[in-house]
Amino acid sequence: MLTRLLSGDRPRSLVLTVILLAILGALAFAPFLFPGVRSLETAARICIFIVLVASYDLLLGYTGIVSFAHTMFFGLGAYGVALASDAMGRGWGALAVGTVAGALAAAVLAAVIGMFSLRVRAIFFAMITLAVASAVAVLVSQLSAITGGEDGLNYSIPRELTPAFRLGEVMGVRINGKLLNYYLVFTCCLVLFLVLLRVVNSPFGRVLQAIRENEFRAEAIGYRVVYYRIIATCLSASVAALAGSLFAIWLRYVGPDTTLSFTIMLDILLMVVIGGMGTIYGAVIGAAIFVLAQNYLQTLMGSAAEATAGLPLVPDLLNPDRWLLWLGVLFILSVYFFPTGIVGRLRTGR
C-alpha cells in the first residue's frame, strides 16, 4: 500500500527515509508538537513551498527547462482567490472559483508562452519567462483599483477557517478555525505532492527524463518533444497556482512582495538545488531546511552572539543582522558537500 502511494519511487536510503518520515510527522502534528503562532506559520509555509518547489522541479529537474516565471503562476493562484473572495464575499464558493480560475489562467498562460518559445533554445524560453513575469509584476502593482497595487488585498475567508471559529481544546491546544485552516493546507499539499510523485514516475515522466537527457534522441524515436514540454510547463504552472491559492487562503492577504517577488523565485531555485534536482523528495528537504533557516537562523544567531559576548570578533560575526550572509555560506557549503543535492548524496552514498 505504501509503495503504491509513493508510486513505486521509494527513498532508497534508510537515512533519507527517516528524515522524510520525521518531516512528515512534524508537519502532521505541528500544532501539537510546536504550539505557537510562529511555529504554525512556519509549518504552513513549509507545506506550501514543498509543493511549489516540487512543481518547479518537474520543469527544471525532470524536463531540463529553466523558467523564471514560477512565482508569476504562484501569484496567479493567490490573486485568483483574493479577487474572487473580494468580489463574491466570504464563502467556500469564492475559494473554489478563485482556485480553479487561478489554475486555469496559469495553465493557459504557460501554454501560450510555451508555444511561442519552447521550439527554440532553452535560454530563449528562460528570457521570455523572465520578461513576462516582470511585466505581470509591474502590471499588478499599477492596477491598484483591482489588485490593490503595492498595498495588496485583504479579504475575508469562511469563518470556519479563522481563529474566531472555536471548537474547544485538546492536549492544551485550541481547536479553532486557524487549526482547521492549517490542516486544509497540509492535506491539500500532501495530495498535490503525491500527484506530482505519480506524474514523474509515470510513462509521461519517463519521457520527460528522456527529453532532458537527449532531446534529439527522444525526437528521433517518435516523441513530440515540444508537446511534452508544453504539457509539463502547463502542469507545473497549474500546481504552482494551486500552491498560491493555498497560500492566499492561509494568509488572508495577497501582495506583490508575498507572491510575485523575484526574491521568491531565487528562493525556489535554492531549495531545488539544496534538496536535489530531479528528485521530488528533494523538494521536501530543501523547503524544510530553507524555510526553517529563514525563520529561525536570525534568532539562533542572536542567542549565539549573546553566549559569546566575551570573545573577540565572534559576537560581531554572529550579529543577527548578518543572517543573510550566513545563509549564503550555508548554501555554498551545501552545494560543495552535496553537489547532487542532499537527496542525491543520500541515495548514492557519495
Image (cartoon, rainbow, N blue to C red):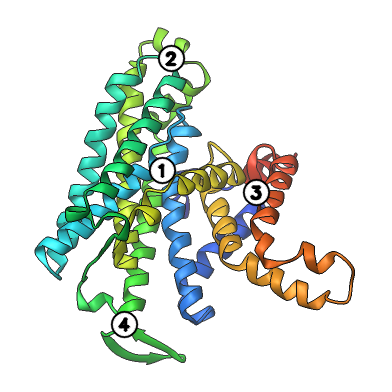
Residue marked by disc 1:
55
Q: CA distance from mark 2 to mark 1?
A: 23 Å
Q: Pinpoint residue 208: horizontal percent, then vertical percent.
A: 42, 27
Mark 3 or mark 2, which has the lower sequence index? Answer: 3
Q: Secondary structure at mark 3?
A: loop
For disc 2, the marked residue is 218
Mark positioned earlier in the residue sequence (4 or 1): 1
Q: Amino acid at mark 1?
A: Ser
Secondary structure beneath dot 1 equals helix
Gap in angstroms between the C-alphas marked 4 and 3: 41 Å
Asked if disc 2 and disc 4 are in contact, CB closer than 8 Å, the reply is no
Q: Are marks 1 and 3 in contact (CB under 8 Å)?
A: no
> Taking 325 as reference, is 60 above or below it?
above
Tell me which numbered mark, 1 or 3, is placed earlier along the sequence: 3
| Comes first in the chain, label 2 or label 1 | 1
Disc number lying in front (4 or 3): 4
The residue at the point 57 percent across, 51 percent down is: 286
Residue at the disc numbered 4: 163
Q: Residue at x 30, y 34 (%)?
A: 234
| Disc 4/disc 1 C-alpha distance (Å) | 30 Å
Does the residue at mark 3 contact the one at mark 2 (Cβ under 8 Å)?
Answer: no
Disc 3 marks which amino acid? Answer: Ser
Kindly report which numbered mark, 3 or 2, lies closer to the viewer in this rendering: 2
Residue that label 3 marks: 13
Q: Is residue 170 left or right of residue 151?
A: right
Please, what secondary structure does the residue beneath circle 4 have?
Answer: loop
Looking at numbered disc 4 in the image, what kind of residue is underneath it?
Answer: Pro
The percent position of residue 6, horizontal first and vertical second, equals 45, 49
**Marks 3/2: CA–CA distance:** 31 Å
Front in this rendered view, residue 76 or 60: 76
